[in-house]
Image (spheres, rainbow, N blue to C red):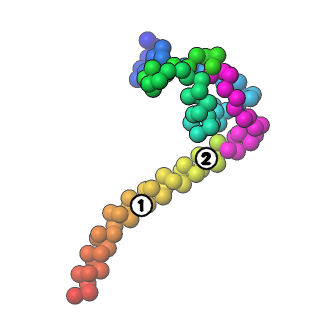
Amino acid sequence: MKPEHDGYIASHRYLTAVTHSDLALPEYLLFYLLAEEGLTAVNEASPGTADRNRTTKQSALAAIRVPVPTIAIQRQFVNLKSTLGKSAAIRDGQKVLMEALLPALCHQTLSHSQ
């Protein structure tokens, strides 16, 4: 094993693929394949009844039809999705802060009202 692979997990049960960089961005394909429509296509291409026994052949994965806009539109989508993810993380952080501050604020307010 090469040092740069330290910490990675490999399995013959999971397919790996490389995108054609002039056709599709990996982040766009990941989003599509994890969305409801994409997951349905992956499940249909994966025979078996139990998740642990479901395997997908490379040819079945390659046969999944993915709507592919231009690279420019994919890039815009990926950037927008990233921005939304950052906004959600900030919002979640603010929620944690508010939940931590609210009891202290209530205590301070109530103790001054007496």
Kind of residue sitting beneath label 1? Lys
Q: CA distance from mark 1 to mark 2?
A: 21 Å
Name the foreground residue: 52 vs 76.
Answer: 52
Identify the image quadrant of the N terminus. top left
Name the residue at 73% across, 34% down.
68
Q: Please state the horizontal and vertical placement of residue 36, each as a whole percent of the image.
A: 58, 39
Is residue 63 a member of the stretch shown in magenta? yes
Name the foreground residue: 85 vs 11.
Answer: 11
Q: Please state the horizontal and vertical placement of residue 13, each as a whole percent of the image.
A: 48, 17
The secondary element bearing badge 1 is classed as helix
Q: Please state the horizontal and vertical placement of residue 15, each as a whole percent of the image.
A: 55, 19
Count the labels in the image.
2
Kind of residue sitting beneath label 2? Lys
Is residue 67 a member of the stretch shown in magenta? yes
75 vs 51: above or below: below
Residue where numbered disc 1 is placed: 95
Q: Residue 65's mark?
A: none
- Magenta span covers which residues? 61-77
The secondary element bearing badge 2 is classed as helix
Residue where numbered disc 2 is placed: 81
Name the residue at 68% across, 22% down.
63
Instruction: Answer whether labels 1 and 2 touch (C-beta < 8 Å).
Output: no
- To which quarter of the image does residue 64 belong? top right
Name the residue at 59% across, 50% down.
83
Is residue 105 shown left or right of residue 30? left
